[in-house]
Amino acid sequence: QVSLVESGGGLVQAGEALRLSCAASGRTFSSPSMAWFRQAPGKEREFVAATTRSGDIDYSGSVKDRFTISSDNAKNTVYLQMNSLKPEDTAVYFCAGGVFSRSRWSYNYWGQGTQVTVSS
């Protein structure tokens, strides 16, 4: 069975940090790429970061230098370390598996999402 399960979301103040985890099972972790997207209320789902099994990494401009994506193949888990959080980072964060891209349409597998709320 294919599944992605996110965890680690919560409510923090601006400037604080959170680490999201995405536990993958089945074929999802054999995907060429794992990524994080986010969706704020009333907005489109947007790319945050992606990594490949060969070590390629990409970040959106809005999170570069603040967020770090990493993976632990032994645990079939992908992480998103989020530092210096801002209120505009508030969104539901989704883990995805697919082809390395900034487009959501390149990813076939999705988790249920975890809420991140940053207060000012």
Image: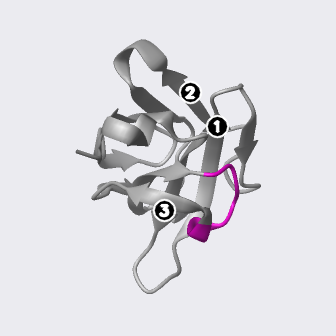
Residue at numbered disc 1: 51
Residue at 36% from the left image edge and 34% from the top image edge: 21
Label 3, secondary structure: give it. strand
Image quarter (top left, top right, bottom left or bottom right) of the C terminus: bottom left
Residue at 27% from the left image edge and 58% from the top image edge: 112
Q: Nearer the viewer, residue 79 or 29?
A: 29
Image height of 4 relative to 38, above or below: above
Residue at numbered disc 3: 38
Kindly report which numbered mark, 1 or 2, lies closer to the viewer in this rendering: 1
Q: Which region is colored magenta?
A: 99-105
Q: Earlier in the sequence, mark 1 or mark 2?
A: 1
**Residue farthest along the bottom direction in this orientation:** 42
The alpha-carbon separation of the residues under discs 2 and 3 comes to 17 Å
Image quarter (top left, top right, bottom left or bottom right) of the N terminus: top left
Query: Crowding at label 3, few (<14), some or many (≥20) Cα neighbours within 10 Å?
Result: many
Q: Locate residue 32 relative to residue 7 in the image: left or right.
A: right
Which x, y percent locates residue 58?
Answer: 74, 44
The alpha-carbon separation of the residues under discs 1 and 3 comes to 16 Å
Amino acid on which the number 1 mark rests in the picture: Thr
Which x, y percent locates residue 97?
Answer: 49, 49
Is 101 part of what is drawn in magenta?
Answer: yes
Give the quarter of the image for residue 66.
top right
Q: Mark 1 touching mark 2, by CB under 8 A?
A: yes
Give the quarter of the image for residue 64.
top right
Amino acid on which the number 2 mark rests in the picture: Ser
Amino acid on which the number 3 mark rests in the picture: Arg
User: Residue 70 got which mark?
Assistant: 2
Label 1, secondary structure: give it. strand
Kindly report which numbered mark, 1 or 3, lies closer to the viewer in this rendering: 1
